[in-house]
Amino acid sequence: MSAYEEEVMQFMSEGYLLLFFSLFSITAIVIVALSNKNSDIKIENKITLRPDEISSDTKVNINNSKKNNR
């Protein structure tokens, strides 16, 4: 291989490395942004036990505080 070809190969490998780290960083930022959505989840359990039966009332309230701004 000539010196020019070695230089081109080194430049290309550095370019792919830069591309990889750029895509990795963008992916990490998107994952963090999506996981930081504010949502309030409240779960209430009321359980009553009787000698011959078990009754359970479960309420699940999910309030998503992210609002659509259009």
Image: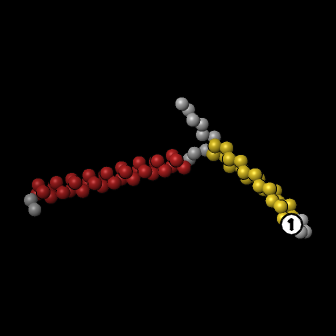
Give above or below for 67 relative to 4: above
Q: Secondary structure at mark 1?
A: loop
The residue that appears at 51% across and 46% down in the rendered structure is 33
The residue that appears at 56% across and 32% down in the rendered structure is 69
Give above or below for 48 relative to 63: below
The residue under label 1 is which amino acid type? Glu
Image location (x, y in percent) of residue 11: 21, 53
The part of the image, by quadrant, that contains residue 63 is top right
The residue that appears at 28% across and 54% down in the rendered structure is 16
Give above or below for 66 relative to 13: above
Image location (x, y in percent) of residue 7: 16, 55
The part of the image, by quadrant, that contains residue 13 is bottom left
Image location (x, y in percent) of residue 31: 49, 50
The residue that appears at 31% across and 51% down in the rendered structure is 19
Residue highlighted by disc 1: 53
Give above or below for 1 relative to 39: below
Give the left or right position of residue 50, taking residue 5 as reference: right
Q: Residue furthest top?
A: 70
Give the left or right position of residue 21, taking residue 11 as reference: right
